[in-house]
């Protein structure tokens, strides 16, 4: 009976191994699937007989080929890649808009100064004066268009951030649910590998949205927290992220509602898409919008002040050319309503309409510097050039960082697959080996039956 019991255990073990191999092959192309194996162990003999070689083979458990360190690398690479990828679209759009010669603020300034220079030839010429107003209005259009583009990006980022937060909350809830199922499967002895794969996929997707710390727990569940330690998932308890009022220094903020606690945190440096969007808005978009506003303020102050020192064709005091409204998106800079060509105060003497002294002073403003928040005190034309240059540098740096992040992500995936991925050739070899094992044990059955029949024949 020892041969039969040994053969039976060997046949069952081979059958179990073939089942595992077929599962691996079936999931050859399944994203995030972790290959499994079977642990074979010789069964020790029972009793005190020195002639028993053993009781066949045992299959105490299945093996899941997973490496926690490689999974952590995979999730970290997803976070870094998400942070840089989320902002590149915005940087590229701004580069194209600000670098377009047809619509740049620098181009508008050049046209405006060209009109002023043309008017200096004949300061009393109505057409030349009208051209100054027309070029000034065209310049305001360029300022307003740029301000609108920046405002549109702020709106788009707000919407994208809200969508990311919704995804974070959904994925966190799914991870908590899977934690409960995995802990339950472990308690009943069921194989939780498919559930663990599903949870790991959710964590990978979550890591692309926000940087994470992931810690294993004794019951098989995972605790997930933000990089600063704020909890998102502990066992089956899940937190919820929401947009909060800005902090005292104006920094954008988030609240995390977890259990009965509420945490408020700055939304910068979070990693993933969420961190990338917040960093871009705080470090690039907002300073750029402030700089454009500062340029409009400087232009308005310089020209309106100088015009106030001059006189119109009729000898009246000069009127302001520009109106500024920093609270407006589409009308940051406009021409003073009702201003006519005759109102332009080009003369420095009310008795001499053809005097161009104040006009020359207006032209000389081109070399005047104005304070720009992100640049210091610079000339208007130089300010825009520096803003475009700085933006280009930021975009190139982000593109380089994104390229590195893509490479690291690809390496992390390959490194994970080297341990956890299904190897088609290896599984084909296992399939043949376990098939031979099954057939060999069936042959032992056949031999045991033959010997048993022969023994019965002798006893008869």
Image (cartoon, rainbow, N blue to C red):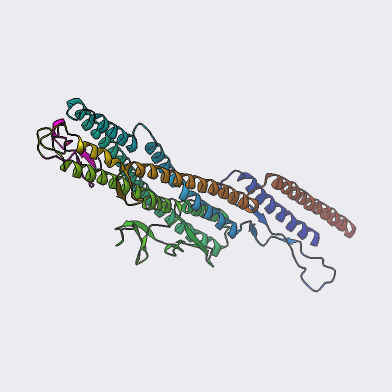
Residue projecting furthest to the bottom? 48
Q: Position of residue 40 (x, y in %)?
A: 72, 59
- Measuring from the top left, give residue 156's x and y in whole percent: 34, 44
Observer-nearest residue: 342 or 313? Answer: 313
**Residue depicted at 21% across the width and 36% down the height:** 359
Residue range (magenta): 317-346
Q: Could you tell me residue 304's position as x and y percent?
A: 19, 43
Q: Residue furthest right?
A: 458
Q: Is residue 386 above or below residue 116?
A: below
Where does the C terminus fall, quadrant-wise?
Answer: bottom right
Question: What residue do we see at 53% from left, 52% from top?
Answer: 77
The mark total stands at 0
Seen from the viewer's position, the closer of residues 75 and 289 is: 289
In the displayed structure image, the side of residue 54 where residue 378 appears, left or right: left
In this picture, is 48 found above or below 139? below
**In the image shown, does 91 or 336 lie closer to the viewer?**
336
Judge left or right: residue 323 versus residue 279: left
Residue 95, by quadrant, is: top left
Residue 457, compared with residue 110, is above or below; it is below
| Whether residue 376 can be seen here | yes
Is residue 78 covered in magenta?
no
Which one is nearer the viewer's eye here, 412 or 313? 313
| Percent coordinates x, y for residue 305 in the rendering | 19, 45
**Magenta stretch prevailing secondary structure:** loop
Q: Is residue 1 at least partly visible in the picture?
A: no
Task: Give yes or no for residue 345 being in the magenta stretch.
Answer: yes
Instruction: Give the left or right position of residue 63, taking residue 182 as reference.
Output: right
Would you identify the image quadrant in which residue 143 lies? Answer: top left
């Amino acid at each position: 009976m020892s041969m039969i019991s040994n053969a039976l255990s060997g046949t069952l073990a081979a059958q179990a191994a073939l089942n595992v191999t077929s599962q691996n092959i079936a999931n050859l192309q399944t994203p995030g699937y972790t290959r499994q194996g079977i642990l074979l162990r010789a069964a020790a003999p029972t009793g005190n007989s020195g002639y028993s070689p053993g009781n066949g083979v045992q299959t105490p458990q299945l093996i899941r080929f997973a490496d926690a360190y490689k999974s952590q690398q995979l999730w970290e690479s997803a976070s870094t890649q998400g942070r840089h990828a989320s902002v590149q679209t915005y940087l590229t759009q701004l580069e194209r808009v600000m670098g377009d010669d047809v619509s740049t603020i620098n181009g508008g300034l050049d046209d405006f100064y060209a009109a002023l220079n043309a008017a200096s030839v004949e300061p009393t010429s109505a057409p030349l004066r009208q051209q100054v107003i027309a070029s000034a209005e065209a310049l305001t259009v360029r300022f307003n268009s740029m301000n609108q583009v920046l405002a549109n990006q702020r709106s788009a980022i707000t919407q994208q951030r809200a969508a990311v937060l919704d995804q974070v909350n959904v994925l966190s809830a799914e991870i908590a649910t899977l934690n409960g199922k995995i802990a339950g499967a472990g308690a009943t002895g069921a194989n939780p590998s498919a559930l663990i794969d599903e949870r790991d996929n959710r964590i990978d997707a979550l890591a692309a949205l926000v940087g994470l710390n992931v810690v294993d727990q004794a019951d098989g569940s995972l605790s997930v927290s933000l990089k600063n330690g704020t909890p998102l998932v502990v066992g089956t308890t899940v937190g919820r992220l929401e947009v909060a009022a800005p902090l005292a220094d104006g920094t954008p903020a988030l609240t995390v509602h977890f259990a009965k606690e509420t945490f408020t945190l700055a939304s910068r440096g979070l990693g993933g898409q969420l961190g990338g969007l917040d960093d871009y808005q705080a470090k690039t978009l907002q300073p750029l919008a402030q700089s454009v506003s500062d340029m409009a303020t400087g232009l308005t102050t310089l020209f309106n002040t100088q015009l106030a020192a001059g006189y119109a064709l009729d000898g009246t005091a000069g009127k302001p050319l520009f109106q500024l409204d920093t609270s407006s998106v589409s009308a940051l800079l406009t021409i003073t309503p009702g201003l006519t060509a005759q109102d332009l105060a080009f003369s420095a003497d009310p008795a001499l309409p053809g005097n161009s002294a104040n006009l020359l002073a207006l032209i000389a403003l081109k070399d005047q510097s104005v304070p720009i928040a992100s640049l210091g005190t610079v000339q208007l034309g130089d300010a825009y050039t520096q803003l475009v240059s700085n933006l280009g540098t930021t975009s190139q740096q982000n593109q380089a960082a994104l390229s590195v992040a893509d490479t690291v992500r690809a390496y992390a995936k390959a490194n994970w697959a080297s341990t956890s991925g299904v190897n088609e050739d290896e599984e084909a070899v296992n399939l043949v080996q376990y098939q031979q094992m099954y057939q060999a044990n069936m042959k032992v059955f056949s031999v045991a039956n033959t010997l048993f029949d022969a023994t019965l024949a002798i006893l008869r």
